[in-house]
Image (cartoon, rainbow, N blue to C red):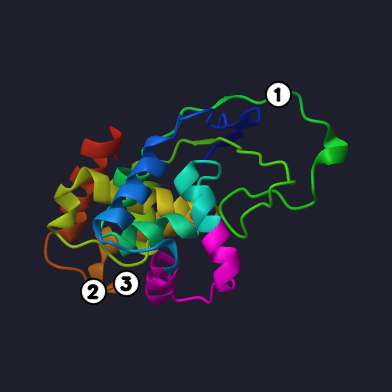
Amino acid sequence: MTVTLNPPYTQAAPTGAERPVWAQQILAARQVRDWSQADAVRELRKVSAESLPDDDTMIRQWKRWESGKTMPGAFYKPLIANLFGASVLGLFPEVTGVPAEPINPLRLRTQVDLFGGPEPQDWQTRVEIRISVHPTADELMGLVIFGGTGVLTLAELDDDDAVTETVRFALAYGGAGEAATWAQRVREMFADPTTGPELPAGYLVKLRRAVARVFGVVA
């Protein structure tokens, strides 16, 4: 798998009354449920398998999300989507980055928020790094089977968004380093299905077709 790091990009901060679509959707989803921001934080804890920061910190963070000042990182995006019964891509459409202003290396902290983790404070410089990947069909199939939060169902393989989200999630959480290994396991499963997880009949064939349909990559 080829991973290419492009120059740093950052999302332009909203000015005046401007607010990103994803921020508007978070706000609307909360208001339609008649939740306060504190209510939303309390409900967010219920869908998180990990402990979250204290209420005051989370409420301040929620305010930044709704205002569009800070986009949720990869850790929080699936939680918020799950909270509102939405897909990650549906709630957070792709954002086109704009070239960042020249960065003084002395201003950068030692920890860069690449794929989620603790949200940067207001005084920190936030950097978005774009990574272009060019996986093979077998690598994509491996990411879907082994890299997601669970194996997609046969019905979900017909959903382009579900397939795309699973691959992106797997890549964001370290799947790029495992893709070649998983691809080899996929090839072994085609030769002998008993070597991998138990899957419904015809699953691998349908997954291969889904990968070709969604990503235009053919084995």
Judge depth for marks 1 and 3 and give the one in front.
1
Residue, disc 2? 198
Residue pictured at 65% horizontal, 27% vertical: 7
Residue, disc 3? 195
* Earlier residue among tags 1 and 2: 1
Judge depth for marks 3 and 2 and give the one in front.
2
Can see residue 34?
Answer: yes
Q: Position of residue 83 (x, y in %)?
A: 33, 64
Tell me the crowding category of disc 3: few under 14, some 14 to 19, or many 20 or more residues within 10 angstroms, Cα based.
few
Can see residue 147?
Answer: no
Tell me the crowding category of disc 2: few under 14, some 14 to 19, or many 20 or more residues within 10 angstroms, Cα based.
few
Residue pictured at 45% horizontal, 29% vertical: 18
Q: Is residue 47 magenta?
A: yes
What separation in Å lies between label 3 and label 2 (alpha carbons)? 9 Å
Q: Position of residue 215 (x, y in %)?
A: 30, 36
Magenta region, main secondary structure: helix
In the image, residue 214 sits, relative to residue 72, either above or below, namely: above
In the image, residue 197 sits, relative to residue 147, either above or below, namely: below
On the image, which quarter does residue 216 sit in? top left
**Amino acid at pointer 3:** Thr
Q: Which residues are magenta?
A: 39-60
Disc assigned to residue 144? none
Q: Secondary structure at mark 3?
A: helix
Name the side, left or right, on which 208 lies relative to 141. left
Tell me the crowding category of disc 1: few under 14, some 14 to 19, or many 20 or more residues within 10 angstroms, Cα based.
few
In the image, residue 181 sits, relative to residue 10, either above or below, namely: below
Tell me if label 1 and label 2 are in contact, CB under 8 Å. Answer: no
